[in-house]
Amino acid sequence: MKKHIPNFITTLNLFSGCIGIILALQYRIDYAAYFIAIAALFDFLDGLVARILHVKSEIGKELDSLADVVSFGVLPGIIIYQLMANSPNTPAAGSYISIFSLIALIIPVLSAVRLAKFNLDTRQTTSFIGLPVPANALFLGSLPLIKMQAGFSDSLSWLTVFTDNYYVLALLAIGMSLLLVSEIPLISLKFKNLKFSDNKPQFILVLIAAISFILITFTAIPLIILTYILLSLIFKPAA
């Protein structure tokens, strides 16, 4: 029975992604973004529980990828589509379907490619090659939350250049999606042990993430993901 527990948690990841998609389609993109974080929590827990229970299954691996496509591919893709379609400078504004905003669907497409490559790539056992899809989803999913935060603070109003500009959003969608399928080696977020010397980039990232989120909340999320990429470039994990 215990071998099914991690798979059940994985289905909660998928369920969270589906709820987020419904909210995003209703343009409740701030609430939809929260469900990316909830899905990411379940995505973390299923692996953790599987290791604690010492269970592993091929169906669990496939189910995890399918859930991730929905929660970290389709959901952020729809969120970015909604931001692009409703931005003040979007081309062909007011049309029933914003054709020019469909570029946001590169996010689920390349997320699916990234996950398929990961399942087959034997190099990605102790590190990643290309940006993990949850990290990309958290980066893109933070944009509506930053938009909301900027609306409550005059000092943060300049952030709307990233959340309300069609062309900036399009560049972010394309650029971040290309990172998914890039050959850039990135560090794993798993701790080998509790020694600082063996987990320098992980400890540094956790410290920066905690301080940044306390100080600037949602605005910290893109900075944390960019710090993760920068630390990977500095420490250069073996592919």
Image (tube, helix red, strand yellow):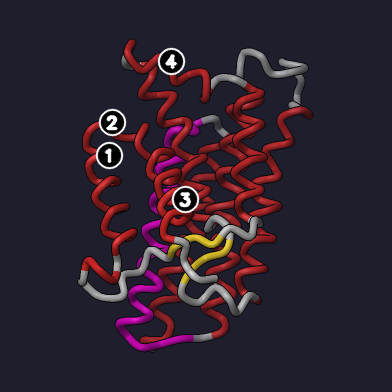
Q: The residue under label 4 is which amino acid type?
A: Trp
Q: Earlier in the sequence, mark 4 or mark 2?
A: 4
Residue 229 numbered mark, or none: 3
Answer whether labels 4 and 3 touch (C-beta < 8 Å). no
Q: Position of residue 72 (x, y in %)?
A: 54, 52
Disc 3 packing (10 Å; few <14; some 14–19; many ≥20): some
Marks 4/3: CA distance?
Answer: 24 Å
Disc 2 packing (10 Å; few <14; some 14–19; many ≥20): few
Q: Position of residue 168 (x, y in %)?
A: 61, 26
Judge left or right: residue 72 versus residue 212: right
Q: The residue under label 1 is which amino acid type?
A: Phe
Residue at (57% x, 64% y) in the render:
129
Answer whether labels 3 and 2 touch (C-beta < 8 Å). no
Residue at (76% x, 28% y) in the render:
100
Residue 59 visible in image:
yes
Answer whether labels 1 and 2 touch (C-beta < 8 Å). yes
The magenta stretch is 28-56
Residue indicated by mark 2: 216
Say which element carries label 1. Answer: helix
Marks 3/2: CA distance?
Answer: 20 Å
Disc 1 packing (10 Å; few <14; some 14–19; many ≥20): some
Marks 1/4: CA distance?
Answer: 19 Å
User: Which circle, 3 or 2, is nearer the viewer?
Assistant: 3
Marks 4/2: CA distance?
Answer: 14 Å
Residue 220 lies in the magenta stretch: no
Q: The residue under label 2 is which amino acid type?
A: Ile
